[in-house]
Image (cartoon, grey):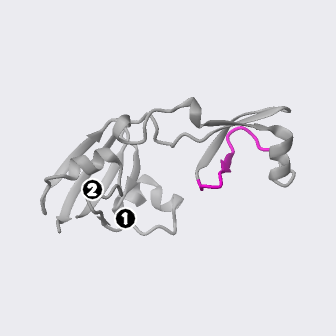
Amino acid sequence: MTLEYTGKLDDGTVFDTSKQSVAEEAGLAEAQPDREYTPLTVEVGAGQVIEGMEEGLIGLTAGETDTLTIPPEQAYGQPSDEHVEEFDTDELQEMLGGQLPEEGAYLEAQDGSQGEIIHADDDVVRADFNPPLAGETLTFDVEIFEVN
Protein backbone atom coordinates (compact mmCIF):
# COMPACT_ATOMS: atom_id res chain seq x y z
CA MET A 1 0.00 0.00 0.00
CA THR A 2 1.36 3.45 -0.91
CA LEU A 3 0.09 6.51 0.93
CA GLU A 4 0.71 10.11 1.89
CA TYR A 5 0.31 10.98 5.56
CA THR A 6 0.52 13.80 8.06
CA GLY A 7 0.78 12.99 11.76
CA LYS A 8 -0.43 15.49 14.36
CA LEU A 9 -0.61 15.71 18.15
CA ASP A 10 -3.78 16.72 20.03
CA ASP A 11 -2.71 20.38 19.95
CA GLY A 12 -2.38 20.30 16.15
CA THR A 13 1.43 20.16 16.09
CA VAL A 14 2.67 18.27 13.01
CA PHE A 15 5.29 15.75 14.17
CA ASP A 16 5.72 13.80 10.92
CA THR A 17 4.59 13.87 7.31
CA SER A 18 5.37 12.44 3.90
CA LYS A 19 4.59 15.75 2.17
CA GLN A 20 7.38 18.23 1.44
CA SER A 21 5.08 21.30 1.58
CA VAL A 22 3.67 20.30 4.98
CA ALA A 23 7.18 19.56 6.28
CA GLU A 24 8.37 23.01 5.19
CA GLU A 25 5.37 24.74 6.75
CA ALA A 26 5.77 22.84 10.07
CA GLY A 27 9.54 23.45 10.27
CA LEU A 28 10.33 19.74 9.92
CA ALA A 29 12.23 20.13 6.65
CA GLU A 30 14.59 22.60 8.32
CA ALA A 31 15.12 20.28 11.30
CA GLN A 32 15.85 17.28 9.04
CA PRO A 33 17.50 18.72 5.93
CA ASP A 34 18.67 15.32 4.61
CA ARG A 35 15.26 13.68 4.71
CA GLU A 36 13.28 13.10 1.54
CA TYR A 37 9.53 13.60 1.85
CA THR A 38 7.92 11.00 -0.39
CA PRO A 39 4.86 8.74 -0.23
CA LEU A 40 5.23 5.83 2.19
CA THR A 41 4.92 2.24 0.99
CA VAL A 42 4.01 -0.26 3.69
CA GLU A 43 3.11 -3.91 3.74
CA VAL A 44 0.05 -4.07 5.98
CA GLY A 45 0.49 -6.83 8.54
CA ALA A 46 4.29 -6.76 8.44
CA GLY A 47 4.69 -4.58 11.54
CA GLN A 48 6.39 -1.72 9.66
CA VAL A 49 4.22 0.98 11.24
CA ILE A 50 2.64 1.42 14.67
CA GLU A 51 -0.22 -0.95 15.49
CA GLY A 52 -2.96 1.69 15.35
CA MET A 53 -1.95 2.87 11.90
CA GLU A 54 -1.71 -0.67 10.61
CA GLU A 55 -5.24 -1.46 11.86
CA GLY A 56 -6.58 1.82 10.46
CA LEU A 57 -5.22 1.11 6.98
CA ILE A 58 -6.93 -2.28 6.66
CA GLY A 59 -9.76 -2.08 4.16
CA LEU A 60 -8.85 1.31 2.71
CA THR A 61 -8.74 1.48 -1.08
CA ALA A 62 -6.85 3.55 -3.64
CA GLY A 63 -8.15 7.12 -3.81
CA GLU A 64 -9.56 7.04 -0.27
CA THR A 65 -8.65 9.55 2.41
CA ASP A 66 -9.17 8.97 6.12
CA THR A 67 -8.26 10.35 9.51
CA LEU A 68 -6.91 7.78 11.96
CA THR A 69 -6.93 8.63 15.67
CA ILE A 70 -4.55 6.37 17.53
CA PRO A 71 -4.45 6.09 21.34
CA PRO A 72 -1.04 5.74 23.07
CA GLU A 73 -1.66 2.02 23.66
CA GLN A 74 -1.65 1.44 19.88
CA ALA A 75 1.17 3.92 19.21
CA TYR A 76 4.19 4.40 21.49
CA GLY A 77 2.61 3.36 24.81
CA GLN A 78 2.52 5.28 28.07
CA PRO A 79 5.70 6.74 29.56
CA SER A 80 7.18 4.27 32.02
CA ASP A 81 9.74 4.51 34.82
CA GLU A 82 11.26 1.33 33.36
CA HIS A 83 12.66 3.50 30.55
CA VAL A 84 14.40 5.90 32.94
CA GLU A 85 18.00 4.77 33.45
CA GLU A 86 20.31 5.80 36.25
CA PHE A 87 24.08 6.20 35.82
CA ASP A 88 26.91 6.85 38.24
CA THR A 89 28.05 10.40 37.38
CA ASP A 90 31.79 9.57 37.47
CA GLU A 91 31.39 6.46 35.28
CA LEU A 92 29.22 8.28 32.75
CA GLN A 93 31.63 11.20 32.63
CA GLU A 94 34.45 8.75 31.90
CA MET A 95 32.41 7.03 29.14
CA LEU A 96 31.75 10.46 27.57
CA GLY A 97 35.44 11.33 27.48
CA GLY A 98 35.41 13.68 30.46
CA GLN A 99 32.28 15.65 29.60
CA LEU A 100 29.65 16.10 32.27
CA PRO A 101 26.16 15.80 30.82
CA GLU A 102 23.65 18.50 31.73
CA GLU A 103 19.89 18.32 32.15
CA GLY A 104 18.16 18.67 28.78
CA ALA A 105 21.04 17.08 26.86
CA TYR A 106 20.61 13.72 25.14
CA LEU A 107 22.49 10.45 25.48
CA GLU A 108 22.47 7.86 22.72
CA ALA A 109 22.29 4.21 23.79
CA GLN A 110 24.04 1.42 21.91
CA ASP A 111 20.74 0.50 20.21
CA GLY A 112 20.45 4.05 18.83
CA SER A 113 17.63 5.13 21.16
CA GLN A 114 17.98 8.58 22.69
CA GLY A 115 17.49 9.48 26.30
CA GLU A 116 16.96 12.98 27.64
CA ILE A 117 18.90 13.76 30.78
CA ILE A 118 16.27 14.68 33.36
CA HIS A 119 18.56 14.85 36.42
CA ALA A 120 22.29 15.35 36.90
CA ASP A 121 24.27 15.92 40.08
CA ASP A 122 27.68 14.91 41.47
CA ASP A 123 26.53 11.36 42.25
CA VAL A 124 23.89 10.30 39.77
CA VAL A 125 22.59 11.07 36.27
CA ARG A 126 19.10 9.94 35.17
CA ALA A 127 18.15 9.72 31.50
CA ASP A 128 14.63 9.19 30.16
CA PHE A 129 14.61 6.75 27.23
CA ASN A 130 10.81 6.75 26.79
CA PRO A 131 9.86 7.33 23.13
CA PRO A 132 9.28 11.07 22.56
CA LEU A 133 5.66 10.34 21.54
CA ALA A 134 4.89 8.05 24.51
CA GLY A 135 1.59 9.02 26.13
CA GLU A 136 0.42 10.95 23.07
CA THR A 137 -2.76 10.34 21.09
CA LEU A 138 -1.74 10.60 17.44
CA THR A 139 -3.90 11.66 14.51
CA PHE A 140 -2.89 10.72 10.98
CA ASP A 141 -4.51 12.16 7.88
CA VAL A 142 -3.89 9.53 5.21
CA GLU A 143 -4.48 9.45 1.47
CA ILE A 144 -4.18 6.07 -0.23
CA PHE A 145 -2.56 6.06 -3.68
CA GLU A 146 -2.13 2.40 -4.44
CA VAL A 147 -3.12 -0.92 -2.90
CA ASN A 148 -1.27 -4.02 -4.06
Q: Is residue 90 magenta?
A: no
Q: Quadrant of the N terminus?
A: bottom left
Residue 71: x, y in percent?
33, 35
> Which of the two residues, 138 or 88, is positioned nearer the viewer here?
88
Q: Which residue is mark 2?
A: 45
Observer-side mark, 2 or 1, equals 2
Q: What residue is at 41 percent from the left and 36 percent from the top?
A: 136
Q: What residue is at 32 percent from the left and 53 percent from the top?
A: 6
> Which residues make up the magenta segment?
100-112
Among the 4 quarters of the image, the one containing residue 17: bottom left
For residue 81, side relative to residue 107 (left or right)? left
| 91 relative to 43, above or below | above
Residue 100: x, y in percent?
82, 44
Residue 4: x, y in percent?
27, 61
Q: Which mark is residue 20?
A: 1
Query: Quick check: can you spot residue 138?
Result: yes
Q: What residue is at 24 percent from the left and 47 percent from the top?
A: 55
